[in-house]
Image (cartoon, rainbow, N blue to C red):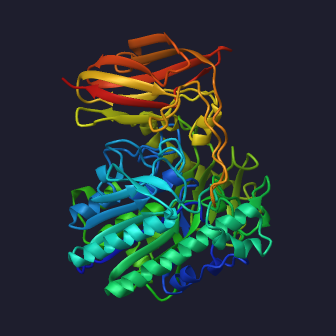
Amino acid sequence: MNKNRPNVLVIVTDDQGYGDFSCSGNPWLKTPELDRFHDDAVRLQQFHTDPMCAPSRAALMTGCYSARAGVWSTLTGRYFLNRDMPTMADHFRAGGYRTGMFGKWHLGDSRRYLPHDRGFDEALYHGGGVIGEMPDRWDNDYFNAVFWRNGVPERFEDTYCTDVWCHEASEFIRRSVADEQPFFCYLPLNAPHSPYDVHADYAKPYLDQGVPHDRAHFFGMIANIDENVGKLRQHLEDLGIADDTIIVYTGDNGTACGATVDHEGFVAEGYNAGLRGKKCWSTDGGHRNLCMIRWANGGWSGGRDVDQLTAHFDLVPTLIEQCDLAGEASAPSRFDGHDLSQALQGEHDEQLDERAIVVHNQQRDNPEKYKDFAVMTRDWRLCQTTDWGPGRRELTRADHDVEQRQDVSEQHPEVVAQLMGVYEAWWEELDAGFDQVWPFYLSQDDDSVMMTAHAWHGVDRPPGIYDQNHCRLGVPQNGYWLIEVADAGRYTFEFRRWPREVDAPMTAGLPARIGVPHVSDRPEGASLSFKRAKLAIHDVDVDQQGDSVALVDQAITPDLCHVTLVADLSPGRYRVQAWLIDENKIDRGAYYCYVNQIRD
């Protein structure tokens, strides 16, 4: 166990896949700073995440399977991280580290779930999973935005989002060093996730090569990340801590835009480092990522490869061991991940040869067994494609069929049976937790709680409403929120079509947002002919379907900005829903709801 208390910097990019580096062979993209890091790091070449972002972040933060952590979707309220699980930041803070997070959180958008509630001393973040989604500040974009610093809004103007996150991380590191405090800095970037908005100077080199528009801007976003990583590494050098800082760099799933794939998942255009599938797929292209780790004073350097099977949830137990964070909450038995210290030191770890790892892509309110999963071992991949891919179960050899072209399930039925046994046992172990829903919490300590359609349960047509453009277009969908009342009292529920910062009538349209330099256009906000609102709160602790504890049915007039329901609530869980009904009797949910406790 190391006693020198290294600093830790974990960088996670969004939608950058294994092939989205020049050091992995991409013929267009140039990443000189990441290439230099690659040349002096230990590279986990068989490193796997989940096929989508929020589940990957949950596993990364907890050291456990994402489903065990309560996260199996980026939407439908299923991205709220299990409140009972300590996070990586909790372990570091308990161990005497200063903890900071800057960027994309996407593990819950209200109190009890936000990063400063989950172990981070300092956190600067946007709402939702993408800048411009429903939980984010209205009309935020990648250049001008309001972010939250420990829950307090703060405006950043004329500064690119990645530059903001990296500058804030640099300042956090500088202050920590000045105070002689070991630090854990978590830098989860929202780039290069769409919208593919970046200054034209970064995209131009790729457009000049004939790279398609979106991919050229995707590459430009990565080029900006590359530049910022170089600045961060130089900052560590200038502070004299570069060799005693553990730096981890990885992505959260396969590429989103680096390649176009056909129905079978094979590359039709672009580059994917010979992998099959991309983001969301259960084949390796959906979840194999390049994880690079450097800690010179710990012997993790020199440009070595680790070819054994590893995963995102291995990072927590590894860092706990190396940073001397051991405690009751950090016992190895609490994690699905494995301490990689032996492999990172250049030694062969026989336990990694024996392991099997399961990943799946649900994107559902309630998980479906056998949907888009992979069981991985050192030698084999058993992949079921459902929503993403040809819709069949295939067995491929991991050792010599990297592109997973040859289905050998008929030749090796015993291997299929063995790996299906792994999946069945894994599902059975996690199945009981699928009924656990992590709600919005209401208490006397909270001034106001904002709930958005991004967290609706029971959406009739998944994936539902999650982007501000959906709100602008007035997409006709509905769902309910689950709340838990901690303190008895009288609460007001303010239901809106537009957020408070817009404060427009529910029936009103909004002008399109077009012509903003380097920013994707946003459509005109449709005017809607709402006539009536029906509001309901149901007590789910009394009855599974919910007994009504408050109901409102009222007319919507053209100047009405919101409709309100007031309810006296005892501690417990409740379902909250609105039906906004137009002249054609089409109902939509209220896209926003603000909850306040009435105090005497």
- Tell me, yes or no, if residue 336 can be seen here: no
In the image, 114: left or right of 421? Answer: left
Pick the residue in front: 438 or 218: 218
Q: Quadrant of the N terminus?
A: bottom left
Pick the residue in front: 256 or 167: 167
Residue 186 in the image, given as x and y percentages of width and height: 39, 65
Q: How many marks?
A: 0
In the image, 283: left or right of 55? Answer: right
Q: Quadrant of the C terminus?
A: top left
In the image, 407: left or right of 167? Answer: right
Residue 505 in the image, given as x and y percentages of width and height: 53, 26
Residue 327 in the image, given as x and y percentages of width and height: 22, 61
**Residue 36, quarter of picture:** bottom right
> Compared to 301, does 62 lie above or below?
above
Pick the residue in front: 333 or 510: 510
> Compared to 143, does 224 lie above or below?
below
**Residue 587, quarter of picture:** top right
Residue drawn at the location 48% of the way across and 40% of the way down:
78
Pick the residue in front: 104 or 70: 104
- Tell me, yes or no, if residue 382 can be seen here: yes
In the image, 460: left or right of 442? Answer: right
**Residue 30, quarter of picture:** bottom right
Residue drawn at the location 43% of the way across and 48% of the way down:
107
Q: Residue reaching furthest left?
A: 600
Residue 553 in the image, given as x and y percentages of width and height: 48, 10
